[in-house]
Image: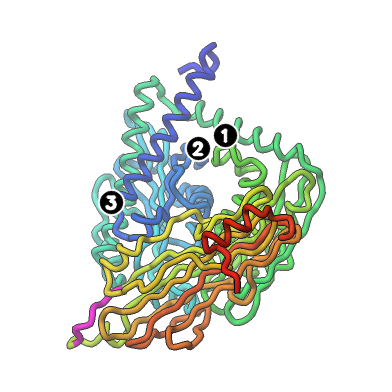
Amino acid sequence: MDLHSPLADIHTQIMWNRLISVVEEQAQTLIRTAFSPIVRESGDLSAGVFDIRGRMLAQAVTGTPGHVNSMAESVKFFLEAFPPREMQEGDVYITNDPWMGTGHLNDMVVVTPTFLDGKLVAIFACTSHLIDIGGIGFGPDGRDVVEEGLYLPFLKLIDRGAINDTLIAIVRGNSRYPTEAEGDILSLAACNDVGAERLIEMMREFSLSSLEPLADHIVEQSRKSVQAEIAKLAEGSYSASMRVDGYEKPIDLVATLTIAKETITIDFSGTSGPSAKGINVPLNYALAYSTYGVRVLIAPDIPNNAGSLEPIKVKAPTDSILNAQRPAPVSSRHIIGQMLPDVIFGCLEQVPGIAVPAEGASSLWNLILESDAADAVDPTSTISRFSVLAVQTGGVGARPTSDGLSATAFPSGVSGVPVEIIETISPLLFRKKELRSNSGGQGTFRGGLGQVIEISNREPAAFDIYAALDRIEHPARGRSGGGEGAAGYVGLGSGKVLRGKGRQKVPAGDWLVVHTPGGAGFGDPADRSQAAVTADIANGIVVLR
C-alpha cells in the first residue's frame, strides 16, 4: 500500500479504523474468556497492538488508563528481555513485575510477537487482574512486595507453541483459586492470538508486508497533534497539591506542571515519602494516570498511542510514594495513583482557557471480601470459602457546565460488578445498594452522588474485608466556590466504625455498611437554577433535613 498515493489519506483512515477494530476484538475476547469477575464484568484490562520497536499504535476502547498507559511502557521492557531477533513464531511472554508491568503483582502482562510469512511484523500485549496470586491476599497490609504474593520475572509462557507447564504449575501452587488463575492467564494468551489473526488478515487484504510505514504515520501524526494543542497554551509552571488519607498518616501529593513550547513536564517533587504499607506507587503507574490527567483535558480527541503520549513527561523523586522502589509493598497502588488526575487538574486550572472539573471520589472503593480465615483452614467447617472483589464507585466532580456523574468510576473507567454476580459466586447478600442522598457537593453544578451499600453473610459466619479506601478524612474539594463532596464511611451495622485501610472482620450476625464518597460541586450554589434545585429534591438527590 502506497501511503503517498492520491488516495493515501483514505487508505490510511481505513487501515486505522481496522486497527481499532482489531484491538477491540482482542479486548472482547479477553472479556468473554476471563475467569475474574473484575475483568469479565468490570472491564479492568487493557489490550493493544505495538510495532516491532515497542511503540503502542492502537489500544482498545475497553480498558483503564492505569493498565493501558503502563502497558505502553511495559512492552519496552519485554523487548529488552526478549530482543526481536530472538523471537520465534508461537512464543508468548509474561510478567507481573510491578515496576516493569502495571504496578502490582495481581496484574499479568502477556506479550505475543506476530509473524507474517515468517517475518516479525507486530507485537500484541494485554493485561488483566487475577483473583489471587498468593501471599497475604489483595490488600494494603503487606510489609514488602515479597509478602504480597508470587512474583514472575520476564518468562516464556509459551515457547514456540509449547505451553510452559512448569510455570502454570507454579502459579496454580501459589493461588488459593488455581483453576481461575490458570484460566485467566490462558485467556490473556488467547486474546492476543485473536488480535494477531485479525492483523494478519488486514495486512494481507491491504497487501502490507510491513506495518512500519503505517506505524510511523500514526505515531508522527498523533505526536504532532498533541504538540499543536500544547503550543496553544500559556507557557509557564503551575503547581498544586492535595492531601489524602494515606495509611499510617495523611499523604501530600504535590505536582508542578511546566508547559514549554510543545512539551508538558510533570514533577512530583515535594510529594510525601513511601508508606510502610502497600499503598506505594511504582513510577510507571504514576506516569499512566498523570499522562491521562493531561490528555483528558488537553487533547481528548487524539488517539492514545506512543506518539500522543511522547510530549508528556513525568518524574517523581526516588523513594517518594509515587516512585516507590523494590521491595516496597504496592498491592493497593490504585488508591494513590487514581488520585493523580485530580492533582493534575489543580495545576491545569491555573492555565488560561482550560475548564477543569471539581474533584471527585477518584480512587475506586474496591470491596475485597473473603471468608473468615479460621473457617478456611478448618477441614470440618461447612462454611463456604470465597474471595470476591466487588468494585464500587463514588461520585464524579461537577463539570464547569454540568453536574457530576453519580456512582461512576473516574478516572479508572471500570464498571461495578453486578450484585447478582457477587451473590451467585459467594454467600454474600446485598441488603442495600442505592444512591447516597446529599453526598454530591453543592454548586452551580452539583457533584455526583456516592452510594450506600450494606452487605451481610447468608451463612452464620464472619467474613473479612481488606479495606483499601480513601476520601474518608479528606473529601473531594470543590472548584470556583463549589462545596465539598461527602466523605466516605465504612463500618458495621452494629455501629462500630472500621478503618479505611487494612484487614478487618465483620462478625457473624453483623453486616458491612459502606458509604462511598461524593463528588465536589462547581461554582457558587446560589447560582444553581431553580429548576435544577426542584428536580434535585423531587428525585431524592437532595433530602431536606
Whole-percent x, y for residue 59 in the image:
47, 42
Please, what is the three-letter code of the amino acid marked with disc 1? Val
Is 173 rendered above or below residue 295? below
Q: Earlier in the sequence, mark 1 or mark 2?
A: 2
Q: Nearer the viewer, residue 461 or 89?
A: 461
Q: Of the residues shown, which amino acid type is indicated by label 3?
A: Thr
Indicate left or right for 391 with 462 as reference. Answer: right
Nearer the N terminus, badge 3 or badge 1? Answer: 3
Residue 500 covered by magenta stretch: no
- Quarter holding residue 305: top right
Say the numbered circle drawn on residue 219.
Answer: 1
Judge from the rendering whether residue 101 lies leftward or rightward of residue 131; answer left or right: right
As drawn, 12 above or below 459:
above
Is residue 146 positioned above or below 63 on the image? below
Residue 25 in picture, x, y percent from top left = 36, 40
Q: Position of residue 252 (x, y in %)?
A: 69, 71
Q: Residue 57: which numbered mark, if any?
A: 2
Residue 370, quarter of picture: bottom left
Amino acid at the residue labelled 2: Leu
Residue depicted at 53% across the width and 50% down the height: 69
Q: Which residue is mark 3?
A: 33
In terms of secondary structure, where does tag 3 sit? helix
User: In the image, 293: left or right of 73?
Assistant: right
- The residue sitting at 51% across, 13% down in the picture is 7
Whole-Å distance between the Cαs marked 1 and 2? 7 Å
Image height check: is 315 above or below 245? above
- From the image, which quarter does the N terminus lie in? top left
Label 2: element kind? strand
Magenta stretch: give its range. 381-386
